[in-house]
Amino acid sequence: MGTLTSKLDAKGRVSIPAPFRALLRQLDEAGDLVLRPSHKHPTIEAWPRAAFDALAKPMQRLDIFSDEEDDLAFMLYAGSVPLKPDGEGRLVLPELLAAHANLKDSVAFIGLGKKFEIWEPAAGAARYSQAISRGTARNLTLPANAP
């Protein structure tokens, strides 16, 4: 959870902030990630491999030759890239993903529970404000007695 900013170097490398790395190691012993372009926003979704596999599991219930399965498979897998941070916790962001998120010289890591997202900082701040406004307008709350 939280929002932390990091620099993007000329080679497209970025250091995952230490709190995110620690949680990633807890969620996925190997520290493997799957990066994918969000199909809703100009951001890169970063999923621990185990969480990504769990996300994709319900697709097994779809008819393999259906339009729904085909479209969802493209949305989920076609732009996804499995990566492992180097020993210093850095990732090399693939050019297509960096372009999708309009990343230039700095990035915002935004923790969202099961995943984190990598945003252009101003766009991430705007999305945060939008989520607060929409959630407030819709009077969103968590279910009572949620585990």
Image (cartoon, rainbow, N blue to C red):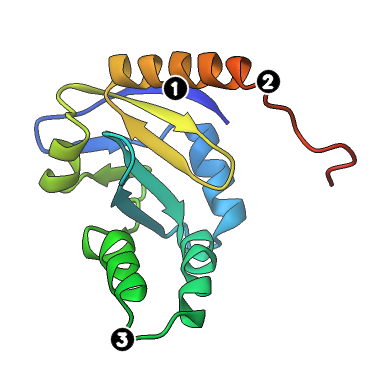
Question: In this picture, is 78 found above or below 60?
Answer: above
Identify the mark nearer the N-term, 2 or 1: 1
Q: Residues within 10 Å of mark 2 (few under 14, many from 20)?
A: few
Residue drawn at (48%, 68%), measured in percent from left and top?
A: 53
Q: Which residue is mark 3?
A: 65
Residue type at the position of mark 3: Phe
Q: Position of residue 74 (x, y in %)?
A: 25, 66
Residue drawn at (75%, 33%), measured in percent from left and top?
A: 142
Q: Which residue is mark 1?
A: 4
Q: Which residue is mark 2?
A: 139
Q: Nearer the viewer, residue 28 or 90?
A: 28
Residue type at the position of mark 2: Asn
Q: What SS does tag 2 mark?
A: loop
Residue drawn at (30%, 74%), measured in percent from left and top?
A: 67
Task: Determine whether, in the image, residue 49 is placed left or right of residue 123.
Answer: right
Q: Position of residue 100 (x, y in %)?
A: 18, 39
Residue type at the position of mark 1: Leu
Give yes or no for contact between labels 3 and 1 (Cβ–Cβ under 8 Å).
Answer: no
Give yes or no for contact between labels 2 and 3 (Cβ–Cβ under 8 Å).
Answer: no
